[in-house]
Amino acid sequence: MRAAVEAYESEEYRELSKLRQEATENSTFTIMEGLDEAAKLRRAMGM
């Protein structure tokens, strides 16, 4: 999570973000904590 936020807030991404925003309409960028792959599988299997 920390690495994702640091990348999002970086100077390099700010430049790329301008391009992304110019190339899209109604775009949303979301950073959120996720589940590890095993947890995703268990959840998909109803476990």
Image (cartoon, rainbow, N blue to C red):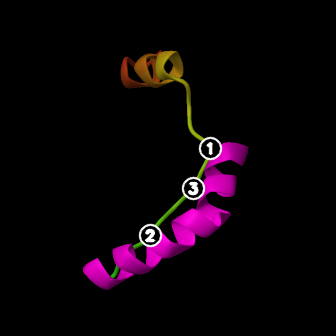
State the quadrant of the N terminus. Answer: top right
Residue 46 sits in quarter:
top left
Q: Main secondary structure of the magenta part?
A: helix
Q: Residue at x 37, y 24 (%)?
A: 44
Residue 22 screen position, x and y as percent: 32, 84
Q: Specify whether 36 is left or right of 19.
A: right
Residue 28 magenta? no
Q: Are marks 1 and 2 in contact (CB under 8 Å)?
A: no
In the image, is residue 17 above or below residue 12?
below
> Of helix, strand and loop, which one carries label 3?
loop
Q: CA distance from mark 3 to mark 2?
A: 16 Å
| Disc assigned to residue 31 | 3
Position of 4 with respect to 18 (left or right) is: right
Mark 2 lies on residue: 16
What's drawn in magenta, residue-wise?
Answer: 1-23
Q: Nearer the viewer, residue 2 or 19?
A: 19
Instruction: Tell whether 16 sits left or right of 32.
Output: left
Residue type at numbered disc 1? Glu
Q: Residue at x 36, y 73 (%)?
A: 20
Which label number is shown at residue 12? none
What residue is drawn where x is 60% and y is 61%?
Answer: 8
Query: Which residue matches tag 1?
Result: 33
Magenta stretch: includes residue 11: yes
> The residue tagged with tag 2: helix, strand or loop?
helix
Query: Mark 3, residues whose alpha carbon is within 10 Å: few (<14), some, or many (≥20)?
Result: few
